[in-house]
Image (tube, rainbow, N blue to C red):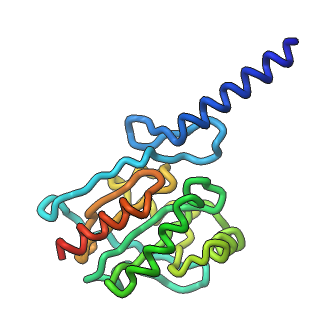
Amino acid sequence: MRRRHAAGLALALGAAVGLAGCGAADSGAGDVVGQGFVSGDGTVQQWEPDDRTDTVVVEGTSFEGDEVSTADWRGDVVVLNTWYAGCAPCRAEAPALVEIATERADEGVHLLGINTEDEAGAALAFQRTFEVPYPSVEDRSGQVVAGLSGVVPLQAVPSTVVLDAEGRVAARVVGEVSGTTLNGLIDDALADA
């Protein structure tokens, strides 16, 4: 009887956690017990052009072995997305990111993934599964994400940052991003150019 009660309590707790989703603490990032990753709550923040300060440059080595730098895309809108293969919200948002990368490339929109956990095998398998057309840089050391300190909570995965044509942060989403939301943020950044 006691085991059945404990199992029922564990099931109820699991359901409560599942219903809570990836809730965030006041900092914008929170850890939901047992999910194995830290995620935000989908909060969107935008900055007006006059409020955008420093230029952000993200660079690293892609899982294919190529050197990548957002400085090469100056003049275009750049979308940065933190992810890793075992992150459920990352998997959920992947099809929308792939669609945006494919459909908006002609407008000068570039996407760059920042993978915070995976070795090449897992990352490349994820990219093949979702037919990801854009590069991702390996960042298990945390150096790339540390460069976004103050913009994105360092432990929030996934997070998405939109850089304007000058390489300044125009918007961020802490947590899973929808295609509709990201397209709107990209539209705004393109309109500011």
Residue 29 in picture, x, y percent from top left: 45, 43
Split into 4 quadrants, where in the image is the C terminus? bottom left
Q: Is residue 191 left or right of residue 122?
A: left
Count of numbered marks: 0
Residue 19 in picture, x, y percent from top left: 57, 35
Split into 4 quadrants, where in the image is the N terminus? top right
Q: Quadrant of residue 132?
A: bottom right
Does residue 132 sit above or below 122 in this rendering? below
106 and 29: which one is in front? 106
Q: Is residue 75 left or right of residue 182?
A: left
Say whether residue 116 is visible. Answer: no
139 and 80: which one is in front? 80
Say whether residue 32 is visible. Answer: yes
Q: Quadrant of residue 123?
A: bottom right
Task: Please give the name of the residue rendered at 68% of the width and 25% of the height, measured from the top-left corner.
Answer: 12
Residue 126 in picture, x, y percent from top left: 65, 70
Residue 144 in picture, x, y percent from top left: 46, 66
Task: Please give the name of the residue rendered at 19% of the width and 62% of the height, measured from the top-left corner.
Answer: 52
Task: Please give the name of the residue rendered at 37% of the width and 63% of the height, measured from the top-left corner.
Answer: 182
Does residue 39 sit above or below 177 in this rendering? above
Does residue 55 sit above or below 75 in this rendering? above
Q: Quadrant of residue 124?
A: bottom right
Task: Please give the name of the residue rendered at 38% of the width and 70% of the height, measured from the top-left corner.
Answer: 79
